[in-house]
Amino acid sequence: MVDKKKIEEAVRLYLEGIGEDVSREGLLETPSRIARMCEEVYGGLDEDADVHLAKQFTVENNEMVLEKDITFYSMCEHHLLPFYGKAHIAYIPNGKVVGLSKLARTVDVFARRPQIQEKMSVQIADALERNLKPQGVMVMVEAEHTCMTMRGIKKPGSKTVSTVARGAFRDNFELQKMFMDMVRG
Ligand code: ZN
């Protein structure tokens, strides 16, 4: 759970640290506003993806399931600046599937915390493997990192792409290409 008092205190110190006057009108409510915001943007820390993925349905036909363009917002754990973009998830069932909204929920659980993109991609794939025991999983995340675009090397529009391929996807380039074509198509 977010400790709002601690965050308010920290934000006041942060503002003082950059030389701001924390008592000026525009900043008066900033600490409490950020504390409330943290409950939302870091809410994934209190959630368990396994809970969302527990409700499963039996299927006869084990064809690839793809949910693409799942928009997400996360916070880079090195700068606490947003990175955001899209996640694409595919899996080949092994008799079980989950509701499509659960894939989006799984992305949110791992996005709403201090995070790095590569780890998030792995965590999503791990959660699917652990819960559904599918024949294969592939996850691709494409994101813009504001810590790279508004500071540092300042390359607006550049995207970081990370992929994870497991099981049947791992060494099967045809399947990986099919995934890519479906994501791009
Ligand atoms: Zn960063």
Image (cartoon, rainbow, N blue to C red):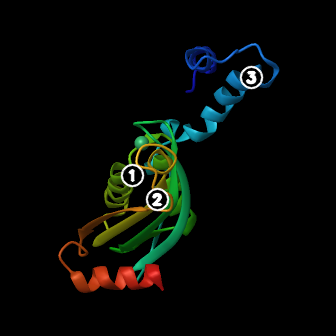
- Is residue 99 among what the camera can see? no
Q: Are marks 2 and 1 in contact (CB under 8 Å)?
A: yes
SS for dot 2: strand
The crowd level at tag 3 (other Cα within 10 Å; few <14, some 14-19, many 20+) is: some
> Which of the two labelled residues, at mark 3 and mark 1, occupies the earlier sequence position?
3
In which quadrant of the rendered view does residue 125 lie?
bottom left
Crowd class of label 1 (few under 14; some 14 to 19; many from 20; radius 10 Å): many
Q: Amino acid at mark 2?
A: Ala
Total number of numbered labels? 3
Circles 3 and 1 in contact, beta carbons < 8 Å: no
Q: Residue at horizontal 49%, vertical 51%?
A: 149
Q: Nearer the viewer, residue 9 or 25?
A: 25
Q: Is mark 1 within 8 Å of ligand 1?
A: no
Quadrant hosting residue 17: top right
Kindly identify which numbered label has been placed on residue 117: 1
Give the amino acid at mark 3: Leu
How far from the left and from the top, in percent, is residue 148?
44, 49
Q: Is residue 165 above or below residue 16?
A: below
Secondary structure found at label 1: helix
Where does label 2 land, which residue? 143
Q: CA distance from mark 2 to mark 3?
A: 31 Å
Residue 130 has which mark? none
Which amino acid does the dot numbered 1 rest on?
Gln
Vertical side of 84 occupied by 75: above or below: above
Disc 3, SS = helix
Looking at the image, residue 84 sits to the left or right of residue 23; the answer is left
Q: Which residue is mark 3?
A: 27
Tell me the crowding category of disc 2: few under 14, some 14 to 19, or many 20 or more residues within 10 angstroms, Cα based. Answer: many
Q: Quadrant of ligand 1?
A: top left
Q: CA distance from mark 3 to mark 1?
A: 32 Å
Q: Nearer the viewer, mark 3 or mark 1?
A: 3
